[in-house]
Image: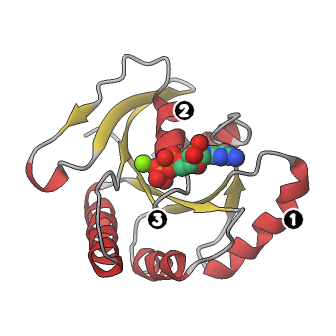
Amino acid sequence: MSNIVAIVGRPNVGKSTLYNRLTESRKAIVDDMSGVTRDRHYGVAEWIGRNFTVIDTGGYVANSEDVFEAAIREQVTIAIEEATVIVFVVDVTTGITDLDDEIANLLRRSKKPVFVVVNKVDNTSLNADATIFYSLGLGEIYSVSSMTGSGTGELLDAVVKTF
Ligand code: GDP
Ligand code: MG
């Protein structure tokens, strides 16, 4: 069985940008699956000789807060079931939102390793702002800029160690 890294988080935190970066320059098999997984993108990635599958969750469109939250909850629940490792993406520019807290509550119950990825840390002056995410209670945080790629190496080093 291949290792699966699921990227979860509320909209606009940069999940797809991170996904594209992790799967870039690979022969990305980006597959739109049917049924319950129709909104998920699957791609292949490689880091220091380890191959794994990356899932980008949350490509859905929703028109109300409630549908939105239910959809996110469903995606997180599926991720907890099928992933080897969960990457929980949050946004340093917004801080912790209610939806972040809700996702954190779901993830805290999971026995799978969870990596809190604080995205949009585009420059070192934002590192101090990132520390607020320790209060999610999910352990270590990984500050990255999915846009520039900064910090993603350290994240991947830690992720592949769990395989
Ligand atoms: P998703 O909804 O979680 O998949 O988020 P997207 O990947 O679509 O990104 C949402 C927005 O955040 C887009 O405008 C991205 O360009 C922007 N974004 C993503 N990563 C970064 C980053 O590292 N730094 C900055 N400044 N913006 C980012
Ligand atoms: Mg997306």
Mark carried by residue 10: 3
Farthest front residue in view: 63
* Residue at the image point whose x is 72% and y is 62% from the top: 93
Image quarter (top left, top right, bottom left or bottom right) of the N terminus:
top left
Pick the residue in front: 51 or 72.
Answer: 72
Q: Where does the image place residue 74, in percent across and percent down from the top left? A: 26, 69
Which tag, 3 or 1, sits closer to the chain's start? 3
Q: Quick check: 127 above or below 5?
A: below
Viewer-side label of 2, 3: 3
Pick the residue in front: 39 or 2.
Answer: 39
User: In the image, what residue type sits under mark 2?
Assistant: Arg
User: In the image, what residue type sits under mark 1?
Assistant: Ala
Q: Where does the image place residue 151, in percent across and percent down from the top left? A: 72, 42
Q: Find the distance from the CA under tag 2 to the CA under tag 3.
A: 18 Å
Task: Report if residue 6 is visible in the image.
Answer: yes
Element carrying mark 3:
loop
Which residue matches tag 2? 21
User: In the image, what residue type sits under mark 3?
Assistant: Arg
Which class describes the residues within 10 Å of circle 1: few (<14), some (14-19), or many (20+)? few
CB atoms at circles 1 and 2 under 8 Å apart? no
Q: Quadrant of residue 85?
A: bottom left
Q: Give the left or right position of residue 31, taking residue 162 as reference.
A: left
Which residue matches tag 1? 128
Q: Find the distance from the CA under tag 3 to the CA under tag 1.
A: 22 Å
Element carrying mark 1:
helix
* Residue at the image point whose x is 52% and y is 75% from the top: 100
